[in-house]
Image: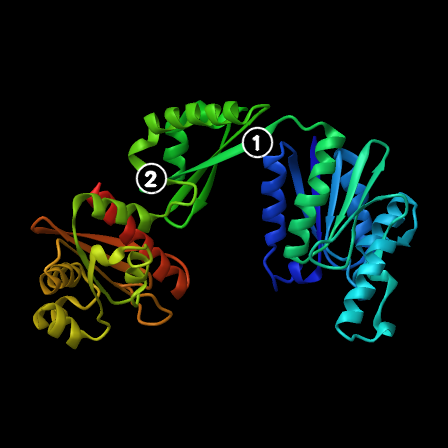
């Protein structure tokens, strides 16, 4: 069964709000065994919405239109679907009674009531709105289903689960599930990772698809089967093959992140850590402390922008700052060692760099970052050169430090 989701709302196109409804519906359809082939976003324009519905109905069994069921003039999803299907919009008496009761209890003026908010497609199955007044519609025309859902997430989610999904299961005798698992890797480039995986990338069930993140690659394994257990078995088999090829780079699955992976290793080994940061302004400490129970391993954090505090707090030599500069391998080394000594911690990590937008030079361009890690009596410093604006460079520096910590502890 193939589905298309048409999300309406000019605010989505302008980037004023994030389309969380699309993520929710996509996940819910997959769990029900329905293949979502396309997601289309359209502004609040009846003609454009109608054209999107026409195009969507050509190659899909299920067309879901989300949003545009409110009382204002730009809420025109119902009108667009009625136009495409050649049907009228009619008032649903149940929704009308609920709306009038709602207004009466809150002393709203009845003349403010608009039939538009309680209209459904003529002849459609009415989808009741448990968290609002605007009802949804489910129409069957020429063996295709068309569903209208409200835009507010709390209304859409309840209507989807209680009203739409049971009808879809009945209409299509859904007997399959789609399950996914994400394996997260770091410390390897996308090209090399795909080269090592070889033919695994081209399997059909389960499938294996990469998504590149900042300093990470996420590989999503997706399996479809009539049995939930069998689908998970297919995923387990694929994960085992994946780990044989890239296991040394896997730091987590699904919701795991790098700070979780670092925290887990620190806990397992009974180690403590301290951080000294310059250009990242405490972002590394934020991530290290973002894990519940982090007080067991994080002993101290210092943000030392000024050279005087690199010397006073961390013991960085004035001569080194004068001859090598604050952004240098030597200063990163002394910062990592100094914070570990100050905190009496097992590990010390330092970050010093040029995040911009000013301060760069030909020898030391914006994006130059040194990361130092003190562990077991020695300090290892790595040189990084990141691209992007100030926020991106700071975030990539933090991710790189977490990755290096994970590799060191692993």
Residue plotted at (48% across, 27% down): 232
Q: Is residue 391 left or right of residue 94?
A: left
For residue 85, say whether it is visible. Answer: yes
Mark pair 2, 1: CA separation = 29 Å
Q: In this orientation, which residue lies closer to the viewer: 391 or 261?
A: 261
For residue 316, say whether it is visible. Answer: no
Q: Position of residue 398 (x, y in %)?
A: 31, 57
Query: Which image quarter: residue 354?
Result: bottom left
Q: Residues within 10 Å of mark 2 (few under 14, many from 20)?
A: some
Q: Position of residue 357 (x, y in %)?
A: 38, 70
Residue at mark 1: 178
**Quadrant showing the C terminus:** top left
Q: Is residue 23 left or right of residue 89?
A: left
Please, is residue 108 above or below residue 92 in the view? below
Q: In this orientation, which residue lies closer to the viewer: 224 or 174?
A: 174
**Quadrant showing the N terminus:** top right
Q: Position of residue 107 (x, y in %)?
A: 78, 75
Q: In this orientation, which residue lies closer to the viewer: 198 or 319?
A: 198
Q: Position of residue 281 (x, y in %)?
A: 30, 68
Secondary structure under badge 1?
strand
| Mark identifier at residue 188 | 2
Q: In this orientation, which residue lies closer to the viewer: 206 or 264?
A: 264
| Mark identifier at residue 27 | none
Query: Which image quarter: residue 228?
Result: top right
Please, is residue 265 above or below residue 393 in the view? above
């Amino acid at each position: 069964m193939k589905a298309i989701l048409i999300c309406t709302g000019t605010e989505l196109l302008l980037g004023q709000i994030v389309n969380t409804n699309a993520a929710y519906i996509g996940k819910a359809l997959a769990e029900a065994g329905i293949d979502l082939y396309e997601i289309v976003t359209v502004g609040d324009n009846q003609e454009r919405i109608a054209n999107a519905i026409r195009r969507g109905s050509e190659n899909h069994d299920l067309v879901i239109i989300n949003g545009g069921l409110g009382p204002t003039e730009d809420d025109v999803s119902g009108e667009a679907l009625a136009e495409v299907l050649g049907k009228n919009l009619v008032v649903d008496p149940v929704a009308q009674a609920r709306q009038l009761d709602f207004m009466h209890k809150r002393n709203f003026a009845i003349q403010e009531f608009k039939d538009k908010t309680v209209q459904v497609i003529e002849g459609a199955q009415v989808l009741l709105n448990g968290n609002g007044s605007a009802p949804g519609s489910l129409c069957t025309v020429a063996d295709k289903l068309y569903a209208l859902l409200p835009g507010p997430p709390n209304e859409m989610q309840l209507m989807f689960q209680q009203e739409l999904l049971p009808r879809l299961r009945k209409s299509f005798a859904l007997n399959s599930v789609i399950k996914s698992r994400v394996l997260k890797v770091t410390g390897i480039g996308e090209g090399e990772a795909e080269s090592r995986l070889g033919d695994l990338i081209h399997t059909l069930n389960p499938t294996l698809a990469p998504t590149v993140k900042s300093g990470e690659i996420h590989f999503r394994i997706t399996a479809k089967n009539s049995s939930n257990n069998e689908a998970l078995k297919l995923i387990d088999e694929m994960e085992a093959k994946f780990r044989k090829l890239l296991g040394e780079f896997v730091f987590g699955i699904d919701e795991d992140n790098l700070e979780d992976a670092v925290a887990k290793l620190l806990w397992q080994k009974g180690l403590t850590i301290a951080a000294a940061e310059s250009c990242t302004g405490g972002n590394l400490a934020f991530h290290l402390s973002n894990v519940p129970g982090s007080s067991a391993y994080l002993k101290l954090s210092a943000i030392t922008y000024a050279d005087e505090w690199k010397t006073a707090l961390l013991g960085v030599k004035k001569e080194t700052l004068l001859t090598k500069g604050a952004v240098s391998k030597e200063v990163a080394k002394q910062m990592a060692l100094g914070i570990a000594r100050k905190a009496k911690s097992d590990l010390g990590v330092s970050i010093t760099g040029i995040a911009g937008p000013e301060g760069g030079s030909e020898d030391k361009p914006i994006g130059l970052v040194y990361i130092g890690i003190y562990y077991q009596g020695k300090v290892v410093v790595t040189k990084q050169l990141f691209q992007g604006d100030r926020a991106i460079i700071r975030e990539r520096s933090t991710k790189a430090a977490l990755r290096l910590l994970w590799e060191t502890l692993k």
